[in-house]
Image: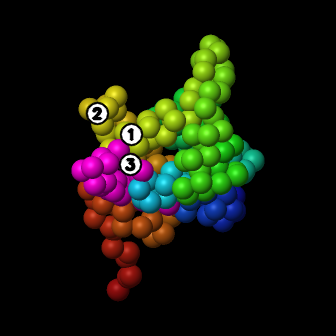
Amino acid sequence: MAEQQVWYEQWPSQVGPMSLQALKAIAAEPPVASPRTPRRWLRGDHDVLDDVLYFECYVEERPGLPSDAPLDVRRELHRDLSAWHAALPFSEAERRLLIDASHVGIGDELASRVRRRYREEEILDAGIRRVTKGRDLMRRWWAWRRETDEFAGQGSLTEAKAALIRFAGRLMPPEQLPDIYYDLQGLTRPVPYRGD
């Protein structure tokens, strides 16, 4: 128990809240643009991308899953992160580009910087060299959040939320999980036992 307590006080207490911030961000309704410019990026689009990339950077900056965590927990956390990444609208190589771009700008700057910096970027993806464009990455992000275009009916946004719910639930004690954790699962927050 003491070993698990050390684990809960370090890595999870830092990464857990970041996963919840990303979860809250992607769970929020996307902003609605005016009918004249229906595909325009709005402040909320930038904020959610910032929160997701902040989580990605935060996890990346930690030296892997904690070695003092029980092996089964480490495996499950790894599966959750893999499921999260698989549900995102980017390949692993594209996700790396976005993480790198996020180190140099956030908000409006980030989306514009990605569009400008990666006009045509050659990446190695699934063993094949191909060209990706920042403009397409940002278009996909916008469509994924709204579950339109190629993401309509795919359920990948729901899968991403589910992966973050599992990830956060493994990292944080139940009493520290916010209402959104329970709401997205259709659960009621457990009432703590206070004794007689």
Horizontal relation, residue 145 to residue 77: left or right: left
N-terminal of the pair, mark 2 or mark 3, is 3
Q: Which mark is residue 115?
A: none
Query: Rounded to the nearest whole Å, what is the CA distance between mark 2 and mark 3?
Result: 18 Å
Q: Which mark is residue 144?
A: 1
Q: Which residues are magenta?
A: 21-41
Horizontal relation, residue 68 to residue 172: left or right: right
- The mark total stands at 3
Q: Nearer the viewer, mark 2 or mark 3?
A: 3
Q: Farthest bottom residue?
A: 196
Q: Secondary structure at mark 2?
A: loop
Q: Farthest right residue?
A: 63
- Tell me whether circle 1 and circle 2 mark residues in contact (CB < 8 Å): no
Please, what is the three-letter code of the amino acid marked with disc 1?
Answer: Trp
Q: Main secondary structure of the magenta part?
A: loop
| x, y percent for residue 75 | 58, 38
Residue 22 among magenta residues: yes
Horizontal relation, residue 187 to residue 131: left or right: left
Q: Residue at x 61, y 64 (%)?
A: 13
Horizontal relation, residue 166 to residue 97: left or right: left
Q: Secondary structure at mark 3?
A: loop
- According to the image, label 2 marks what residue? 152
| x, y percent for residue 37 | 32, 48
- Tell me whether circle 2 and circle 3 mark residues in contact (CB < 8 Å): no
Q: Quadrant of the C terminus?
A: bottom left
- According to the image, label 3 marks what residue? 40
Say if residue 193 shows up in the picture.
yes
N-terminal of the pair, mark 1 or mark 2, is 1
Measured along the vertical axis of the image, is residue 116 above or below residue 27? above
Q: Secondary structure at mark 1?
A: helix
